[in-house]
């Protein structure tokens, strides 16, 4: 099934002006909740979920409206980069910077794909990007207990 990236029209019957992602992506995301909610350490889980929110708000919603994703957010001084950096205490920034840089780079590569291949598998891949970026061993060790942010 091809992901339907069609601009919304009033005829679509969507009073809020925003269509939800196709049910298959929503169902898949819900089925993956255990993975998202058990990512460790806790700081990584929070970062992954924040990237997911950005994907929904700044990639999928604009595409449903027939617009391009917010690529500028992925710049070093972009909204997503600055948001992620703000979630990390200054003393830990050096350790987490690599994860952030790789996540932003992989998102840029995925968003550079031509619209013709932007199907449901592509959308699922976006959500897997931050989850699949490995942590340096010293970061996980430094974070210690998963119950503390």
Image (cartoon, rainbow, N blue to C red):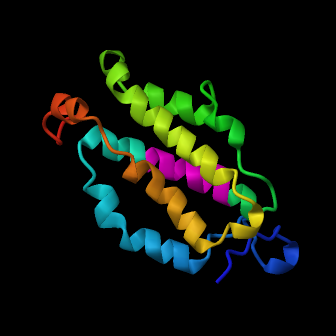
Q: What x and y, as percent, mark residue 82? A: 54, 27
Q: Which stretch did the figure color magenta?
A: 49-60
Name the quarter where the C terminus is drawn.
top left
From this viewpoint, is residue 28 visible? Answer: yes
- For the point 66% across and 52% down, which residue is it? 111
Exactly how many numbered labels are in the figure?
0
Q: Nearer the viewer, residue 135 or 35?
A: 135
In the image: residue 115, left or right of residue 82? right
Q: Main secondary structure of the magenta part?
A: helix
- For the point 73% across and 65% down, which residue is it? 64
Residue farthest along the bottom direction in this orientation: 1
Q: Nearer the viewer, residue 139 or 5?
A: 139
Q: What x and y, as percent, mark residue 131? A: 38, 52
Q: What x and y, as percent, mark residue 132? A: 38, 52
Magenta stretch holds residue 38: no
Q: What x and y, as percent, mark residue 116? A: 76, 68
Seen in the picture, residue 95 relative to 57 is either above or below; the reply is above
The image quadrant of residue 76 is top right
Seen in the picture, residue 5 relative to 99 is either above or below; the reply is below
- For the point 59% across and 66% down, which residue is it? 122
- For the point 51% across and 62% down, which residue is it? 125
In the image: residue 51, left or right of residue 11? left
């Amino acid at each position: 099934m091809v992901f339907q990236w069609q601009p919304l029209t009033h005829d679509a019957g969507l009073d809020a002006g925003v269509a939800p992602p196709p049910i298959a992506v929503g169902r898949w995301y819900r089925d993956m909740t255990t993975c998202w909610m058990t990512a460790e350490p806790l700081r990584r889980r929070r970062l992954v979920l924040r990237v997911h929110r950005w994907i929904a708000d700044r990639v999928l919603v604009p595409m449903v409206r027939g617009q391009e994703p917010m690529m500028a957010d992925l710049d070093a001084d972009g909204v997503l980069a600055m948001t992620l950096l703000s979630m990390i205490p200054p003393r830990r920034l050096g350790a987490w910077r690599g994860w952030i840089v790789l996540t932003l780079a992989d998102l840029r590569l995925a968003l550079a794909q031509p619209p013709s291949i932007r199907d449901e598998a592509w959308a699922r891949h976006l959500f897997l990007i931050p989850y699949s970026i490995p942590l340096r061993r010293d970061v996980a060790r430094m974070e210690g207990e998963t119950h503390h942010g």
